[in-house]
Amino acid sequence: MMKMGQSNALGERGPQKKERFHHKSKTGCKTCKIRKVKCDEARPICQRCIKFGLGCDGYDDESRAIQPSKFSHGQVFPNPQKGAVVPRIQPPPAILCRSPQRSLFSNQQEARYFQAFTTHTASQLKGLFASNLWNHLVLQACESNVSLRHAVIAIGALDPKTWRGPAESDEETSRRPFAYHEHSIAIRDMRTAAMQESLDFRTRPMACLLFICFEIYHCNKTSAVAQITVMSSLLETSSKHSHITIYDLDDELLESFRELEVQALVQNCYGKDMIGTQQRLSCRQTMRSKIPIRFATLRQARSVFHVLAMRRLHWQGTSRYEWPWYLTTQTMGSMTDPPPNEWTSNEEWCLERDRRFEEYTAWSNAFQPLLLAARASTQPAEARQANVLRMTYLYTYLSLMTRMLSPQESYYGQTARLTELLGLLNSLLESCPEDYGFSMECNFLVPLSVVSYQFRHRALRQEAIRLLLAYPRREGLWDGVLIAKYSQWLAEIEEEGLEDEEYVPLDLVGGLVAADHDPIRRTVRLVAFKRVRNPVGTMVRREAVLSW
C-alpha cells in the first residue's frame, strides 16, 4: 500500500437515479403513436418529435396529456465550468420499436444492411453496461438524417464479427466495398450539411460516434483519435454558441463520449494536444470533496471514475514530464521524485500527486459497498459489471504508480495487486458471452497491457500474454493480438540470460522507442533498446517487423 494516508471521502451523497417509467402511454401525441415510440407528452407539442426533426400532430385528448417531471432520471456528470460532479436532469429517452420504412432506402442492399445493424450489430456495440444508444437512439436519429442512415448502413455492411482479418468469403468480399461506398456518402452528406450550417447540435456528435466506430473496425488509430478530438471540440464550442448545451444530450451518448475521451487521452500522449493551456491548468484542481461517501448505482460510480481518469490524464500533461519520469532523467531512476522543471516545482508536483492517489482511494471506498452487494447478488450481469469496475480501478491505480512513484515503490512489491487483477481478467474472459471480440468500450485490453508491458513480473506477464492470444479482441483503440506480439518480443529481449528472478531487474528494463503500424498490411515495425550490464550502461538497439 501507499505510504500516504487514505482519504476520508467526505462529500455530498450522490443523486440517486430513479427508475424509468415503463408503462405503455395512452396519452402520447398522434405522431409518436403512429411511429410507436414513447412520447414525452409535453405541451403544446411533443419535444421528442422536435428533437429528431419531425412534425408533431398534437394530441387526441388535450385533457389527458401529462407533463414530464423535471426531477426524473437524474445522473452524475462533470460540470464543464467548475469540474464538479453535478446531477443531470433529463427525461428518459424514447424507444424505437421498429426500423425506418423501406421507402427511406435507395435500394435493396441499403435496406438489408440497415436491418443487419438493427438485429445484430447494435447488440454487439452496446457494451457490458446496459444502454439504449445503439439499438434505440441511433436508429431513431436515422429516421430524420440521411447521413447518419448511410453511416449506420456502412457499419451494418462491415459486420463487426469479421474484424479479425481480410474478407474470407464471397459475401464478405462483396459487402466491404459497399460499406466503403456508404461511408463515403455519409461523409459527403455530413460535409455538405456542415457547410450549409444545417446540422443541429445533437446530430454532429452522433455522426462522430459512427465515424469513430468505422475507423476502430479498421484499426485506424490516428483517424479515430482525430474524430474523438473533433467530437470533444464540438461538445465544448457548440454549447457556447447555442441555447442547447451538453446536458441536453442523452445520457448514453455522453457516457460513450467519456469512454472514448479517456481512450484518446491515453493514446495521444495524455491529451497534450487536445486541450488548451487554461484547461490544462484547471485540471490541477482536486475534486475529491465531491465524491460521495457511497455510490448509489454502478453507473454513477462508472461516470465519476471517467471524470477522475480524464482529469488525471490532463494533469499529467501539465507537468511536462515524459513518463515514466525516472527513465528520462540523467540519473536513470536513482531519484525518489522528479526534478523541478520550468512548468512544475517539485513541491507542487508531489502535492498534486498525493491528491490524485487520495481521489482514487476515496472512489474505492465509495464503491466498496456496491462491489460487495453485487458479488452477493444472484444477477450475473450485475456482478460482472462490478468486477469490471474493480478491475478498472486496479489497473488505473497500478498505472498511476508506475508514472508517479520511484521504481522501488511502484515496480516491486505490487505482486498482490497484479495477481488480483489477472485473476479478475481470467474469470471475466472465461465467462464472456460470445461477442466476437469487438467493442467500442475498452474493458480488458488496457489492464492486460498494464500487466504485460508496464510491469515486469515475469510469470504474470506471460499469463497476460497468453490471455491476449487466447481471447483475440479489438476494444476501442487497442488490438489485443498486437499488444501480445510486441509484449512478447520485448519480454524475450529483457529476459535474455535471466535465471530465477521474479521480476526483470530495473537495470535491464527496456522499452519501445518506436512502433510504426500499418493497419492495411497488419504489420508493425518496432525499435527498442536492450540494456546490458557489461559494460555498465550499455544499450543495444534492437529492431523487428511483426505481423498480427
Image: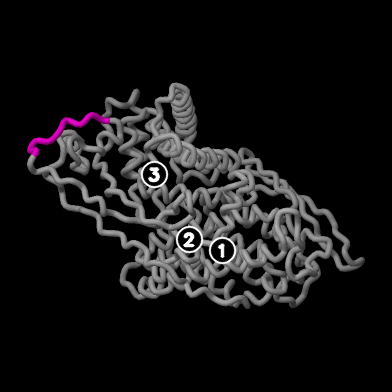
What percent of the width, then of the height, locates residue 386? Answer: 41, 67
Q: Is residue 407 visible?
A: yes
Viewer-nearest of labels 1 and 2?
2
Magenta-colored segment: predominant secondary structure: loop
Task: Assess disc 3: are there few (<14), some (14-19) or many (≥20) residues with their C-alpha within 10 Å of its C-alpha.
Answer: many
Of mark 3 and mark 1, the one earlier in the sequence is 3
- The answer to whether 138 is drawn above or below residue 397 in the figure is above
Residue 371 is marked as none
Q: Which residue is located at x 52 percent, y 39 percent? A: 233
Q: Quadrant of residue 419?
A: bottom right
Circle 1 residues within 10 Å: few <14, some 14–19, many ≥20: some
* Amino acid of disc 3: Thr
Are discs 3 and 1 less than 8 Å apart at CB?
no
Q: Secondary structure at mark 1?
A: helix
**Circle 3 SS class:** helix
Q: Which residue is mark 3?
A: 121
Amino acid type shown at disc 1: Thr
Alpha-carbon span between mark 1 and mark 2 = 10 Å
Report x, y in % for residue 136: 31, 43
> Looking at the image, is mark 3 or mark 2 earlier in the sequence?
3
Quickly name the residue at label 2: 305
Residue at position x 63%, y 56% in the image: 316
Q: What range of the chain is rendered magenta?
A: 54-62
Residues tagged 1 and 2 counted as in contact (Cβ below 8 A): yes
For residue 396, the mark is 1
Can you see residue 440? no
Q: Is residue 214 left or right of residue 281?
A: left
Distance from disc 3 to disc 1, alpha carbons, whole Å, reads 30 Å
Report the residue that reaches farthest toward the right: 535
Q: Secondary structure at mark 2?
A: helix
